[in-house]
Structure formats: structure tokens, C-alpha cells
């Protein structure tokens, strides 16, 4: 993609731009080139040259310049990935060429059969194949016209898909433009797969679990779900990746496109992530079989999931000659890897108590190697699950890595029972603190409701310091456990009163790590209010709700006086959430803890609100009702607040503006009766802000 000369030049430009006090509009294109280069290094090659903050610094320069000179913004500027429509509807669009799927093969005999048919039709003795991984994600097609990405679509039914261009633009390994014209190609349709790396998938699932939602079974589901999200900005947060592997249509006659391997190389050279390195061109089917088998042994070393290999006839002319059936091409076949399963013995059961007191049974297994990892324990979710699977201690169980990530028990093998197996008895008391366990109606989980329970306290501290909460770097789960067990930390405020002298005495704590820890703890005091709210681990309050909550108050203790009705008026807050918030803030020991944290210098006020109170709508009260068309309610509220407005929760004579969306109900009726309340449409509200 970049010659070493160009790399040198771009590195030089980067340094100059980073050092510059001022970047002028004449340097905008150079700034864009530099940003594109670093995007490519980071997202396509996985080999960045810049620190994140350096990239951000340059990116912000560009944002600033483009703001000052909007007429100079280009469609493929790195800033133009950012989504604009917040609630997109996906339009159905036809593919230029139908997206067929592949026939499957499972063993050498199937591949020999495929090759025999291909040789019969072509009359050749031996065929050249290109073999590459079969990515386990969601397939897409991209169209580039005159070098610009003009459309991205889902597979749909193969003939028509959904236009997801806005979401595709958020994936930074997909270039917004590429020099096809210079290769004689005006229009091209490329197919590929959107994937989520194993690591991003785990991060995503942890988030879901934190929010009390069920984790997804595999990265494929996560990727396809992400592609169809209404808000492109959320797509950007998912860290999706793309592999492009097939040119389905193109104008012009570049020589590289005469073979499949040539097209992967060309796409790679133009800045796309393709399986250039993973693919292999092989003569004859025997070499293909060997390569497929060999790759299967390496699948666990890859950072992303693959579920097999794809074998393709390499020469495009031959592909055309072979043609297709109504379902799949005759020139390609998928070789599916075996499901990863193993049998082992269930040796015991452990009951773990989580942050919210939920008791999770964990099956202990005779360690067994399964797809790259040794599995020695598996969560068995809850009592019902144990009954349903009829698990007994001593049983032989068949286990599988579902979606190749989370191991689970498929079934018991009752024919191997000896009669010595013991039933699993679910405890009636907390295995950590001994208090009685409770089960709420309609729930499957048993809980320890003693909030002083050591296991819960420790898990709450772990959550508080975690990345999405207060993000106290260098703390981490292991240190929380260690300090807690040593008696150096007993609750959340304890984080801010650590005895560093004693910690310094622990093994492995040098001056540097002590300094780092202290600095990180100190820095966390400045974290915005929503992080603190999220960090408190209030049940059902995930990150998004925490943001809404933070925006609705001036000070966190205001929640102690909020009625359930006021809480219900907030976006995303239903009865369950409102009750949980009230439960938290009506508990005197929680209030005591918050006061203690405030005394220690943490941010308990909503700074954003404070800073903007002097805006153009200063002191004016707003209430939003009904469904807004252009933005989420929380965003509209944030905009009003940014101009100094105050959000209130009910219609009264104190209300200045009621902004009504679609299907507004009783609030609108009530407001109509109070003639001091001004009723605005969404557009009128936006116009008011623009004044
Ligand atoms: S080629 C006409 N190559 O597997 C042939 N497909 O079961 C076009 N897939 O729908 C497909 N990795 O979503 C091709 N390297 C690869 C692939 C691949 C994953 C997916 C694709 C396709 C499905 C077929």
C-alpha cells in the first residue's frame, strides 16, 4: 500500500504536524493523508506508529480546520466516518451480483469429490486453487464508484440486502476511498465479512453481563447485531473489523483481477484488509486437503474466529466456465472445521457470589483441552439449568465451546454412570457469609441479600475500579482481592485511604508501581459523575442509564429525594430500574459512603450542568414528551442543558417549554391547559437553540 519512501515521508509529515503550533488550511489534505496512513497502520496492519493521544491530537486539528472551512470537507475525510443520523431506517437495496452462499464439505472425501467434478467440467488434469480462512462473521458487500465508498449492504436474502452504509463507515479498517481509477476500475463490488475479534467479543459480553443482560453466544451474532444498530455511533464503539475476500463485479480490465489471489493482493495494495497472508495458492486437491487440515490445528492461535477454510478455483476464466447451481458456485466450496467438543468428568460444584449477591453454580471439571484452552470449570448458570441437564457429581459430560468462545455443557452421558454419582444440592445459605439465600418470584437466581457479604463487597470494589467505571489503572481485580484479603481495603472509600506504606511492604510492589497506583487513584477523583454512578454498581444501572441519571441532577444526593415518578420520567428508566435506584439511595449506609467519598474529593456534582448554566436559555425549564424523530430524548435534554436550560420532570406552572414528539400523551394535554407553557415541536426547539 505504501512504499518505504512514502512511509518515511508520512512519518516525517506526522512529526512536523505534531510539533506545529498552528496548522493552516493549506495543510488540510496533508493532515488527512497522515491520518489515513495511521488509521491503516492501526486498523489494517495492527501495527500502529502513533500513540492514541497523538492520533487524537491530529484528528482534533482536522475537526477544527473543517469547522472553520466546511467548504473544504471531503467525503472521504477521516472525520466523515462519524454518523449523523441517529435513528436510521435501513432501506432494501439490490446487490449488483447476487450473493450466493457456499456448498459445504467436511472431510477429504468431500473435497476429492468437489475437485473431480471441477476437473470433469473443465477437462483439466489438475486445477490451481486458492485456499483461505472462512471468517465467522456477517457478510457484507461494498460498492466503490470513482474511488469513493458509495454503499455498504448486508447479505439479506442474497438478492437484496439492507443499506447499512452509515454503519459500515464506522469500521476503520474499511477505507472510505481507494485508488481504483488508477487501476482502470470505475465501479467495483467487493464482498467480505464483518467480524469481531475474540478480544472485542469478550469485552462486549462483559459489558452485557454488567448490564444484567445475557451474553451473546458467539462473535458472529455480535457482529451481525452490531451492523444493524440504529445509531452509527454505537457501531463505532463495538470495534468491528472487516476482511474482504471476493470481487463480485467490476468495470475495466486490470490484470490482477484475472485470478482470485491477484484480486486479494490488489485489494490489499489499495488499503483493504484481505487474507493476503493467510491465503495459499496450491496445485491440485491433495495439497489443498493438507493445507486445510494443517490450518485447523492453528485456528486457536488466530485473534478472530474462523469456522473453516474456503477453497476457490484461482483462475477467474475457469470460475466462469464452472458457473453455478441455483444455490452456490461450482468453483468454490467451504471446508468446515469440526465442532470443538470433549468429554470429561464433573468432579464437583462451587458456588460463587457475585456483586449483586447472585449465587452462580460453577461446575468443576477434570481439566480437558478444548480448542486452544484447558477447561477446568464451567458456569452452569442456575438451579433450573442443573435440573434440566440432570447433572450429578461424578458424571461424564460432553462439553463444547459454544461459538468457540464460552465453554458449556452439552449433555450428560448417562450410559456411563456407575451409580456412584451424587446429586447436586443447591445451598440454602450464602457460601461466603452464611446468610439465608432468597429467590425473587419469576427469577431463576438465588441471591444473598446481605450487602455486607464479603464476596459482594469485594466484587463491588472490583467493579468500581474497573475500566468502564472509575477506570483506576494499575488497580485491577487481583490487587483488590489481595488488599482485601490482607485487611488493607474493606470498602469503596477505603480506596482513597490506602496505607501505601503497608502496600509498599507487599511482595512485587516497588516504588514505581506504588507511584502509578497512587497517581491513578488520585486522578480518578476527577472522573465525571456518570462514571461514579455506574461504578456504584446499582442493579440494572448500566453505562447508558448512568449517563442519563448523571444528566438529570446537580448533585448525586439529589437522588435521595427523587420520587419514583420523577425517575420514571427519565429515558430508559422503567419501574424495575427506578425501584433499584430508590433502594440504593434510601439506604443510609450508601448515603454515608457517598458523603465520605465527597469528603475525599470525588466529583459528586454534575460538572457539565454547572459549567453551562450561563447559556442562552439560562434558567428556562424544559420537558420533552413523545418520541422525537431526530435525536434521542437524552440528547435533546443534554442540548437544552448545554444552553443553560433546566430539565424538569412534570408539567406545572413552573414549566417554560414542553417539546413534543410523536404520540405525545397526557403531558401535552395538561400543558395545553396552562397558558404560560410554550409548546414546541422538535424543529422549533432546534430553532430556539440556534437563536
Ligand atoms: S467467498 C460466491 N470467502 O461464508 C462466493 N466466503 O457459507 C462468495 N465466508 O456467505 C463467498 N469467509 O459470508 C467467501 N474467505 C471467504 C469467506 C466466505 C467467510 C462466508 C460468506 C458466505 C459464507 C458461505
Image: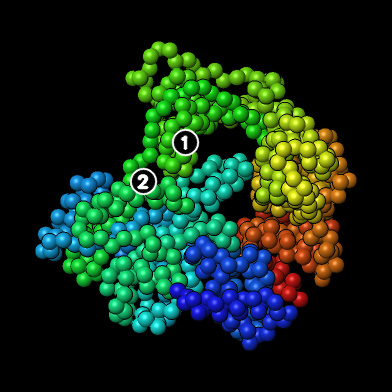
Dot 2: element:
helix
Q: Residue 673: percent from the left, percent from the top? A: 77, 58
The quarter of the picture where the N terminus appears is bottom left
For residue 543, which numbered disc appears in the image? none
Q: Residue 481: percent from the left, percent from the top? A: 69, 35
Q: How is the image coloured?
A: rainbow
Q: Decide: few, some or many residues near mark 1? Use Cα within 10 Å; few <14, some 14-19, many ≥20.
A: few
- Residue at 75% over, 29% down: 452
- Residue at 28% over, 62% down: 281
The reply, left or right, for residue 649 in relation to residue 313 is right
Dot 1: element:
strand
The reply, left or right, for residue 453 in relation to residue 341 is right
The quarter of the picture where the C terminus appears is bottom right
The reply, left or right, for residue 507 in relation to residue 333 is right
Give the labeled residue for mark 2. 297
For residue 374, which numbered disc appears in the image? 1
Instruction: Compare residues 459 and 663 and report the one nearer the observer.
Output: 459
What is the C-alpha distance between the residues marked 2 and 1? 15 Å
What residue occupies the far bottom of the structure in this picture?
A: 26
- Residue at 78% over, 38% down: 505
Q: Residue 76: percent from the left, percent from the top? A: 53, 76
The reply, left or right, for residue 486 in relation to residue 132 is right
Q: Quadrant of residue 503?
A: top right
Quarter of the picture for ligand 1? Answer: bottom left
Among the two numbered marks 2 and 1 on one chain, the one whose residue lies closer to the N terminus: 2
Mark 2 C-beta closer than 8 Å to ligand 1: no
Amino acid at each position: 500500500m505504501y512504499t518505504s519512501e512514502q512511509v518515511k515521508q508520512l512519518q516525517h509529515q506526522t512529526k512536523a504536524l505534531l510539533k506545529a503550533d498552528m496548522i493552516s488550511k493549506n495543510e488540510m489534505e496533508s493532515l488527512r493523508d497522515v491520518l489515513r496512513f495511521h488509521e491503516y497502520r492501526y486498523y489494517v496492519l495492527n501495527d500502529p506508529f502513533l500513540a492514541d493521544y497523538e492520533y487524537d491530537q491530529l484528528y482534533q486539528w482536522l475537526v477544527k480546520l473543517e469547522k472553520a472551512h466546511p467548504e473544504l470537507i471531503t467525503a472521504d475525510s477521516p472525520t466523515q466516518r462519524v454518523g449523523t443520523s441517529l435513528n436510521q431506517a435501513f432501506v432494501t437495496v439490490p446487490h449488483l451480483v447476487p450473493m450466493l452462499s457456499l456448498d459445504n464439505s467436511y472431510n477429504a472425501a468431500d473435497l476429492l469429490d468437489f475437485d473431480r467434478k471441477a476437473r470433469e467440467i473443465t477437462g483439466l488434469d489438475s486445477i490451481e486453487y486458492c485456499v483461505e480462512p472462512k471468517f465467522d462473521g456477517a457478510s457484507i458487500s461494498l460498492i466503490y464508484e470513482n474511488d469513493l465508498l458509495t454503499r455498504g449492504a448486508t447479505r439479506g436474502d442474497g438478492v437484496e440486502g439492507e443499506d447499512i452504509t452509515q454503519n459500515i463507515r464506522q469500521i476503520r479498517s474499511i477505507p472510505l476511498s481507494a485508488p481504483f481509477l488508477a487501476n482502470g476500475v470505475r465501479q467495483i463490488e467487493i464482498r467480505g465479512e464483518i467480524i469481531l475479534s475474540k478480544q472485542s467479543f469478550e469485552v462486549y459480553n462483559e459489558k452485557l453481563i454488567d448490564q444484567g443482560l445475557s451474553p451473546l453466544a458467539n462473535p458472529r451474532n455480535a457482529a451481525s447485531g452490531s451492523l444493524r444498530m440504529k445509531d452509527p455511533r454505537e457501531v463505532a464503539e463495538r470495534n468491528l473489523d472487516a476482511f474482504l475476500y471476493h470481487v463480485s463485479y467490476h468495470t475495466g480490465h486490470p490484470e490482477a483481477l484475472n485470478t482470485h489471489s491477484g484480486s486479494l493482493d490488489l485489494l490489499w495494495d489499495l488499503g483493504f484488509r484481505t487474507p493476503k497472508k493467510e491465503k495459499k495458492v496450491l496445485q491440485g486437491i491433495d495439497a489443498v486437503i493438507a493445507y486445510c487440515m494443517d490450518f485447523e490445528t492453528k485456528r486457536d492461535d488466530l485473534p478472530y474466529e474462523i469456522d473453516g477454510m474456503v477453497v476457490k478455483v484461482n483462475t477467474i476464466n475457469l470460475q466462469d466456465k464452472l458457473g453455478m447451481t441455483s444455490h452456490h458456485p461450482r468453483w468454490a466450496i467451504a471446508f468446515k472445521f469440526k465442532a470443538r467438543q470433549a468429554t470429561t468428568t464433573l468432579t464437583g460444584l462451587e458456588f460463587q457470589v457475585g456483586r449483586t449477591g447472585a449465587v452462580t453454580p460453577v461446575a468443576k471439571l477434570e481439566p480437558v483441552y478444548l480448542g486452544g484452552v484447558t477447561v477446568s470449570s464451567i458456569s452452569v448458570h442456575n438451579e433450573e439449568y442443573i435440573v434440566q441437564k440432570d447433572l450429578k457429581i461424578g458424571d461424564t459430560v460432553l462439553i463444547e465451546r459454544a461459538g468457540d468462545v464460552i465453554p458449556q455443557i452439552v449433555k450428560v452421558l448417562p450410559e456411563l454412570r456407575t451409580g456412584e454419582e451424587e446429586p447436586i444440592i443447591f445451598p440454602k445459605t450464602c457460601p461466603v457469609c452464611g446468610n439465608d439465600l432468597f429467590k425473587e418470584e419469576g427469577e431463576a437466581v438465588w441471591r444473598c441479600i446481605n450487602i455486607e457479604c464479603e464476596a459482594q463487597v469485594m466484587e463491588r470494589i472490583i467493579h468500581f475500579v474497573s475500566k468502564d467505571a472509575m477506570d483506576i489503572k494499575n488497580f485491577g481485580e487481583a490487587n483488590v482481592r489481595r488488599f482485601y484479603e490482607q485487611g488493607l481495603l474493606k470498602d469503596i472509600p477505603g480506596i482513597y485511604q490506602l496505607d501505601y506504606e503497608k502496600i509498599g511492604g507487599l511482595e512485587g510492589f516497588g516504588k514505581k508501581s506504588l507511584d502509578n497506583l497512587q497517581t491513578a487513584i488520585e486522578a480518578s477523583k476527577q472522573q465525571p459523575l456518570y462514571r461514579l454512578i455506574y461504578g456504584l454498581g446499582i442493579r440494572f444501572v448500566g453505562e447508558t442509564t448512568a449517563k442519563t441519571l448523571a444528566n438529570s441532577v446537580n448533585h448525586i444526593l439529589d437522588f435521595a429525594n427523587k420520587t419514583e415518578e420523577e425517575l420514571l420520567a427519565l429515558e430508559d428508566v422503567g419501574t424495575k430500574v427506578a425501584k433499584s435506584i430508590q433502594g440504593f439511595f434510601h439506604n443510609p449506609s450508601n448515603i454515608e459512603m457517598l458523603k465520605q467519598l465527597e469528603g475525599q474529593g470525588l466529583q459528586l456534582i454534575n460538572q457539565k450542568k454547572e459549567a453551562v448554566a450561563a447559556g442562552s436559555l439560562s434558567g428556562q425549564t424544559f420537558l420533552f414528551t413523545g418520541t422525537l424523530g431526530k435525536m434521542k430524548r437524552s440528547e435533546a435534554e443534554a442540548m437544552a442543558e448545554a444552553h443553560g436550560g433546566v430539565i424538569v420532570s412534570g408539567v406545572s406552572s413552573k414549566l417554560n417549554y414542553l417539546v413534543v414528539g410523536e404520540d405525545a400523551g397526557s403531558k401535552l394535554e395538561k400543558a395545553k391547559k396552562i397558558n404560560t407553557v410554550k409548546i414546541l415541536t422538535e424543529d422549533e426547539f432546534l430553532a430556539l437553540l440556534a437563536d
